[in-house]
Amino acid sequence: MIYSAHYKRTLALIMEKENKFLIPLAVIVAGALVAGAVFFKSKSPSVPTETGEPVDVEVRPVTADDHILGNPNADLVIVEFSDIDCPYCSVFHQTMHKIIDEYGVDGQVSWVYRNFPLDQLHPDARAKAESTECVASLAGNDVYWKYLDALFARTETLADLPSIAAEFGVDQTAFNTCMSDKRFAAKVKADGDEAMAAGGRGTPYSVMVAKDGMTFPINGALPYDVIKQTIETALKGE
């Protein structure tokens, strides 16, 4: 087919205008895709998702070696895998305290905390997790929870950990020895491996375990009202 010179010039102008529009659009789309990839990699595992349905998830049985707040024989045990430097975990930590205040007094719900440091996002989180285990071994469960609460409430460096532990009566020399020996590195790793095996891909990741064995996974820092609704469902055995 033979095109006239006028038609060719008109077509060239149209293509030039379309290209001027498409190039910025391509940049915008590419930027959106990159932003989405960054969001998915760093944040989406922690963004709240729907829950409430029982799903078969395996977590190891709760023992005396666990960090438990509330009655170990509660009707419902919430096993949380968490990262001390995760901002979503900090929010969820307060939510869980509220849950225990409401359901823990009469033994309906207890809270078990296990470690899930995300090294790529929070390079200090693993050492902080190990420090909580050191505190537990040196001062017991009650001091462990006070120390853990303090770490979630503050912005601190690793150099601050001995003095924070000392605030709760932990011997600094013994604490420093425990940390330098990496005494609980294997335990922290085992917790994280368990979280991954149970389906955790971000923090916080929790599993509600009912007495009948039903499990209810919780992905992310879900709001109090959503957690409460799931608890009610689990307690009724629905």
Image: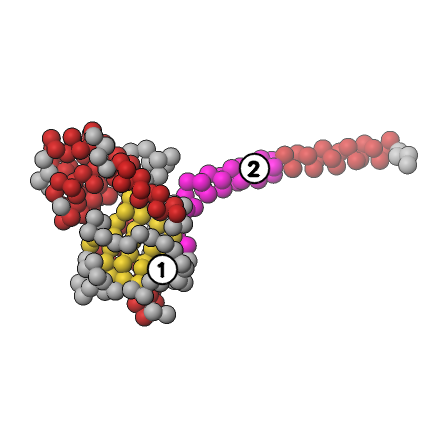
Foreground: 113 or 220? 113
Image quadrant where residue 179 sits: top left
* Residue underneath mark 2: 30
Tag 1 residue = 215
Q: Residue at x 17, y 43 (%)?
A: 136
Q: Which residue is more in the foreground, 117 or 42?
A: 117
Residue 78 pos. (x, y %): 29, 56
- The residue tagged with tag 1: helix, strand or loop? strand
Please tell me whether residue 86 belongs to the stretch shown in magenta: no
Res 167 seen here: no
The three-letter code of the residue at mark 1 reads Thr
- Residue at 26% x, 49% y is 113
Judge the density around disc 2: few (<14), some (14-19), many (≥20) Cα neighbours within 10 Å: few
**Near-viewer residue (27 or 189):** 189
Q: Amino acid at mark 2?
A: Ala
Distance from the alpha carbon under mark 1 to that under mark 2: 40 Å
